[in-house]
Amino acid sequence: MLSKRENNLRHQLQVVTLDDLVPMDHLVRKIDQAIDFSFIYDLVEQYYSPNNGRPSIDPVVLIKIPLLQYIFGIRSMRQTIKEIETNVAYRWFLGYELTERIPHFSTFGKNYVRRFQDTDLFETIFYRILKEAINEGFVDPEAVFIDSTHVKANANKKKFIKKKVRTETRRYQEQLTNEVNEDRAKRGKKPFTPKTTTSEKELKESTTDPESGYFVKNERERMFAYSYHTACDRNGFVLGAIVKASNVHDSQVFTDLFEQIKSKIGQPRAVALDAGYKTPYISKVLLDEGIRPAMPYTRPKTKKGFFRAHEYVYDEYNDCYICPEGQILPYCTTTREGYRQYKSQAHICRSCPMLFKCTASRDCTKQIHRHVWQDYLDEVEHLRHTDKNKEIYAMRKETIERVFADLKEKHGLRWTTLRGRKKNTMQAMLAFAAMNLKKLANWKWRPSVHLYFFIKLNEKPLLNHLVCWFRRGFSTI
């Protein structure tokens, strides 16, 4: 039977409360139950005048508004305010009445510039939410997964200047220099004197956002971007993040992020990293700390048709290499960069039938470089073949890779509308706080889920009963 709705119902008066209009299982209800936002008052009290001036907008509302933006992946603050004006669930979450005026979209930006800029407010909020998840037992920091992803900057890739900048000294350079000099002294060679000159490199600097970095992904994709260096646990909770220009290599940021995790969360037992972090220094740091590194296989970098590196056997006792033809490559020197050089003898190599597969040098001399911390890399390579490491590394696609996918697809950070590293750091901490908050709220909302995993398998009647309740969508038992 065909039926029609009467349009005059639009103007019918009804007596309802705002609470009646929000579904009981809506995400904002779960978030409201999961955490008490009153802790924000203590964090921002110092930024407000106690007894004069106009009454301010509630600081909890100021923080909740951008959290709504990142939780629901709304593209801009202007659009967020429009959504709040018409969405009763958002109004309920902020504590606003149906007809109450919502703050202007520029309010958060003005408060950021005048009050919250150059503070650790957003980082503190991030760790406060993470602490709540830790207290609930949802975070498992035994294994930490670290990686980075690029977020496109709000800058035209065609507007740049070429600029020469000083090459930054590696933070472990002093430690490396000391070990190199010790190694040279043992072998009767003079130690290196400290460098008095600095090297320079040419970079493309954006005229729109100078703090971003020029990122080359492939031949077709070039842009100015920021890198979000992030760590998470096996359950997908973000444990820490650092924002850098995208032309800063992953290995240069690892130490800062690793120290952040140790100080805020605690020392993990295992760390899973991709090939960009597979360096002698990072291997040394993790193994010296007693942490199990899980790193991937890296393809040989030798030219096609030549002997692979593993075909040259290192003789640790005699400190030399043996080539596939059985000839010895004795130690020559140790470079300032920390590599020991081993050279073959030219008069022997000239008559070698396998010379064409060994080296293409004009003087018929084969050189092999071995880092002073190569033993740590060898141990990492040995651990790579263990079942434990294979299990840990395989979880990257379910943890850190999923975090980045959700960040870009569900929470609106495939590109940024802000300029400057400080603003992008603020945005990153709010976005990751929103992701942790969403996961915390969903996990905390259903007590029956936790009971399900703690019931013994032999208690089948009770287990079946709980499964039925869970499938029906009941939040409590």
Image: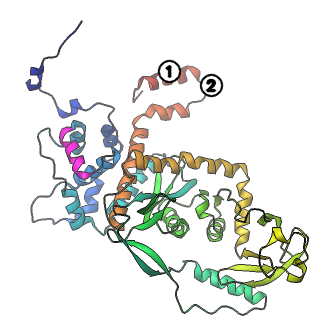
Query: In the image, is residue 252 above or below residue 464?
Result: below
Mark 2, residue position: 458
Q: Residue at x 12, y 21 (%)?
A: 7
Residue 300 shown in magenta: no
Q: Which quadrant, please, contains the N terminus?
A: top left
Across and down, in percent, residue 262 comes to: 52, 63
Across and down, in percent, residue 372 comes to: 71, 76
- Near mark 2 (Cα within 10 A), the count class, few <14, some 14-19 or many ≥20, is few
Which amino acid does the dot numbered 2 rest on? Asn
Q: Which mark is residue 101?
A: none
Q: Residue at x 78, y 65 (%)?
A: 306
Q: Nearer the viewer, residue 202 or 112?
A: 202
Q: Residue at x 45, y 81 (%)?
A: 165
Query: In the image, is residue 334 above or below residue 153?
Result: below
Q: Is residue 434 left or right of residue 468?
A: left
Query: In the image, is residue 458 above or below residue 112?
Result: above
- Tell me which segment is drawn in magenta: 76-86
Viewer can see residue 387:
yes
Across and down, in percent, residue 240 comes to: 46, 59
Q: CA distance from mark 1 to mark 2?
A: 13 Å
Q: Residue at x 62, y 47 (%)?
A: 394
Q: Is residue 6 left or right of residue 427?
A: left
The secondary structure making up most of the magenta span is: helix
Mark 1, residue position: 465
